[in-house]
Image: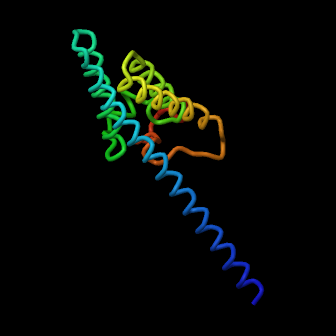
Amino acid sequence: MRFGRANALRDDIASTDQILISSSFFAVRLVNLAVGGLMILGGIGQFFPIGFQSVIVGCYVIIFGAATLLLEFQIPPYMSRWAPFLFSFLGRGIFYIFVGTILLQTSAIRVVPGSIIAIVGLGYGILEYIPSIEPPQNMRDASGEWGAEQI
């Protein structure tokens, strides 16, 4: 009887661990979706006042935001080859810091999203060096070949 309780307790702990892991993956996914939306918002804000350079930068930031959003739903097979940095916390963190600093300019519609994106990027950079935290499935190498996790 004693071993039955121990096994039940072990199973409860295992299921609790699974819930915590899946909720942390959900949180990372939610943050990535929010960052993608902020990139698109910041890219739209980049158009005002209108100018050649602002339009070009705005288009790039909108494309980066759309790509970030789409990566949360479906990972194209070529992404692990062409953008392997998006499959690790450090690579994605540096990418977010880059996009966030592009947006840091004069108006609040650019500074606020840019600051939030850069802070999230800094947080992801820190998460890379915490060994107990693994990236969620959609941030791992999709093909199983040479990817960001093996570098």
Q: Give how far across and how far down residue 22 sits, in percent.
A: 51, 57
Query: How far from the left and from the top, in percent, is residue 120?
Result: 51, 34
Q: Quadrant of residue 128?
A: top right
**Which residue extends farthest right?**
2
- Please report the residue visible at 25 percent of the width from the left and 19 percent of the height from the top: 47
Q: Residue 17, position in %: x, y?
A: 61, 62
How is the rendered protein coloured? rainbow
Q: Is residue 25 above or below residue 129?
A: below
Q: Image quarter for residue 139?
A: top left
What residue sits 50% from the left and 25% below the top? Answer: 94
Front one among 25 and 101: 101
* Residue under the image location 27 percent in, 14 percent down: 54
- Please count the marks in the image: 0
- Does 44 sit above or below residue 49? below
Q: Going by the image, does 9 lie left or right of 34?
A: right
The outermost residue toward the top is 52
**70 sits to left or right of 138:** left
Residue that lies at the very extreme toward the bottom in this rendered image:
1
For the point 49% across and 51% down, the residue is: 25
Task: Give the quarter of the figure containing the N terminus.
Answer: bottom right
Image quadrant for the C terminus? Answer: top right
Q: Nearer the viewer, residue 97 or 22?
A: 97
Q: Is residue 117 left or right of residue 74?
A: right
